[in-house]
Amino acid sequence: MLFKTFSWEGNEIFVYKKNSEKNEISERLEHIKKDEQGKPYLDKGYISISHTDKYDVYAFSTEGYVGVDIEPCDRPVNKEIMITDIKEWTIKEAVIKTFKLISIKCVLKVNIASGSIAVYNGKKYNYKVFDFDNHYLAVAKID
């Protein structure tokens, strides 16, 4: 069951209740492939996927790489990795998902600049955070 949709700078974000029918995007989901690392991709367009115990999230873009992450607002953060806020973690993970890398080392190298800009390896990324139902959902793209 479709719970919520968001649109941001050419990206479409669909939020579904966990394990529910995804009728609105079923045709797109049929075209998802996985690379040798198990990361999803499309022949035409770009996709990023995230989930929690409660939601499945799909972000689609026809304009360029997109990254998405969703986390419960009350999820504890491991302060030993120098990130003290789950919202910050969600933004950083969305940024690194734009280029399909997921590792603690990559997340720690993302700098959140002013406004809605993050920087990783000298490249700027735009991001937007949506706050709903006690969750943060961050979506990012290369500037």
Image (cartoon, rainbow, N blue to C red):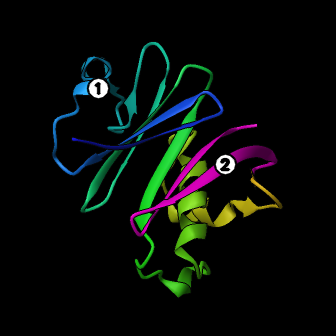
Q: Secondary structure at mark 1?
A: helix
For the stretch drawn in magenta, the main secondary structure is strand
Q: Amino acid at mark 1?
A: Glu
For the residue carrying disc 2, how many other residues have a C-alpha within 10 Å: few (<14), some (14-19), or many (20+)? Answer: many
Q: Which mark is residue 127?
A: 2
Q: From which residue to which does the magenta span run?
A: 120-143
Q: Residue at x 30, y 25 (%)?
A: 25
Q: Residue at x 59, y 62 (%)?
A: 107
The x and y percentages for residue 95 are: 61, 49
Q: Please report whichever mark, 2 or 1, sits nearer to the chain's N-terminal start.
A: 1
Question: Quick check: 35 above or below 75?
Answer: above
Q: Is 3 a magenta residue?
A: no
Image quarter hosting the C terminus: top right
Most distant residue in the top direction: 44
The quadrant of the rendering that contains the N terminus is: top left
Side of 53 relative to 44 (left or right): left
The answer to which of 119 and 68 lies nearer the viewer is: 68
Q: Which residue is mark 1?
A: 24
Instruction: Using the numbered discs, state the Cα–Cα distance from disc 2 to disc 1 in whole angstroms.
Output: 25 Å
Where is residue 33, by image quadrant? top left
As drawn, 56 above or below 36: below
Q: Nearer the viewer, residue 88 or 38?
A: 88
Residue 140 picture location, percent across and down: 61, 44
